Image (tube, rainbow, N blue to C red):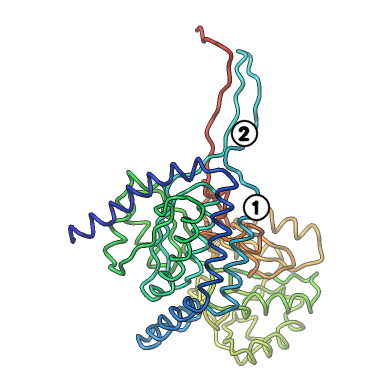
Amino acid sequence: MSADLTTYITGLGKAARQASRVVAAASTQVKSDALKAIAAATDEARESIKAANAEDMGNAESRGIDQPLIDRLLLDDRGIDRMIEGILQVDSLRDPIGEVTDLSYQPSGIQVGKMRVPLGVIAMIYESRPNVTVDAASLALKSGNACILRGGSEAFASNQAIGACVTAGLGKAGLPEAAVQLLNTTDRAAVGELLKLHEYIDVIVPRGGKGLIERIMQDSMIPVIKHLDGVCHVYVDEAADLEMGANIAFNSKVEKYAVCNALETLLVHEKIAADLLPDLADRYGQAGVALRGCDATRAVLPGIDAATESDWYAEYLGPTLAVRVVDDVSAAITHINKYSSQHTDTIVTSDFQRARRFITEVDSASVMVNTSTQFADGFEFGLGAEVGISTDKIHARGPVGIEGLTSQKYVVYGNGHLRHR
């Protein structure tokens, strides 16, 4: 391990810890000034960001990087507009820091409540998507945290261009540049160094492929907020409107393949399989989606490949979909709770009781009724943006936005009260 690399990463951690205290004490107005300045700088740097992204895209294609990763890497005008919109949406959200709740008097006369506080220093380790750089910076600032960002080597130029906009915005608002620090190295050993900095970093948020997240879970000395897979389901019930069911199943898969909220297994009630599947299979075929089905599915669609046990666990992140015909909502729930990665699952039905049962019994971070799984996103949930999606059950679950980057501490008010045992 290079001593220079260790010194560099440790220096980032120390600077982030110092900056975190400044950001934690910053007023809502100062944080708002910083976010607006970052949005303006991003808009002004639009051409340089696109040029940097074109460099990354060219390098990725020449290196033979998989198409799903290249798709995530692209940052055009629409993507930049969405980044800016996300920054401004984060800015418009209520500032939770310093909020005191649940104040109550105790028999002793003291008053006890809870105050919302930042976590401190957040380290984000992510792949491909350069928009994550500004999403993470915005959410960290709004929630009063400092952050250290380590993007993937394939997006290095894009991330550096975006990072320069963040630094400029911080400076205009009078906040320390160390409040958001972007690693200037693609050395993979830098990740290992970050994972050791428990003295300076409070939480690690990995966002990327399963291999990256598994490595961080194994090696980190710091708490991790993460999800491993996005094995998402749509169950089309016998009480569903068939057109709605087909549209939701199609959109959940085809709107974007290389995302963790994309549909990977379609479940269909046996009583509507013959009516729903043939036309839906034609739509999937025109979109280039290959189907793999159970025996009952292949009885309706004899031309598709047989699904194996491994297909029910698969996160394809591409144009492949597993299809299973089930007996009823009970069978759908059983299948999901066995094979799901606890990310996002949807029921399509007009039956209120079945919908209620589904959202109660399906053990996932986001459970939906009559809508596409691709809505499982911090931006779409009104969080402004997200640093990632958590399938954990402690601290944060689902899209992690501002509140997921905070904690609470007890505050106690007295007037000379003394305890006597």
Visible residue check, residue 400? yes
Find residue 239 and name its label: none
Q: Which mark is residue 100?
A: 2
Q: Nearer the viewer, residue 7 or 152?
A: 7
Image quadrant in which you'd find residue 77: bottom right
Question: Residue drawn at (40%, 69%), measured in percent from left and top?
Answer: 160
Q: Secondary structure at mark 2?
A: strand
Viewer-closest of 23 and 289: 23
Question: Where residue 252 sits in the image (x, y, percent)?
Answer: 65, 74
Mark 1 or 2, nearer chain start: 1
User: Residue at the spot x=49%, y=42% of the render?
Assistant: 24
Residue 43: x percent and y percent? 56, 71
Left or right, 322 with reference to 356: left
Q: Position of residue 329 (x, y in %)?
A: 71, 64
Q: Residues within 10 Å of mark 2 (few under 14, many from 20)?
A: some
Residue at the (75%, 56%) spot, across then down:
356
Disc 1 is placed on an element classified as loop
Looking at the image, residue 347 sits to the left or right of residue 206; the answer is right
Residue toward you, 355 or 109:
109
Which residue does the numbered mark 1 point to in the structure image? 93
Q: Is residue 322 visible?
A: no
Name the quadrant containing residue 116. top right
Rendered location of residue 250, percent (x, y): 67, 80
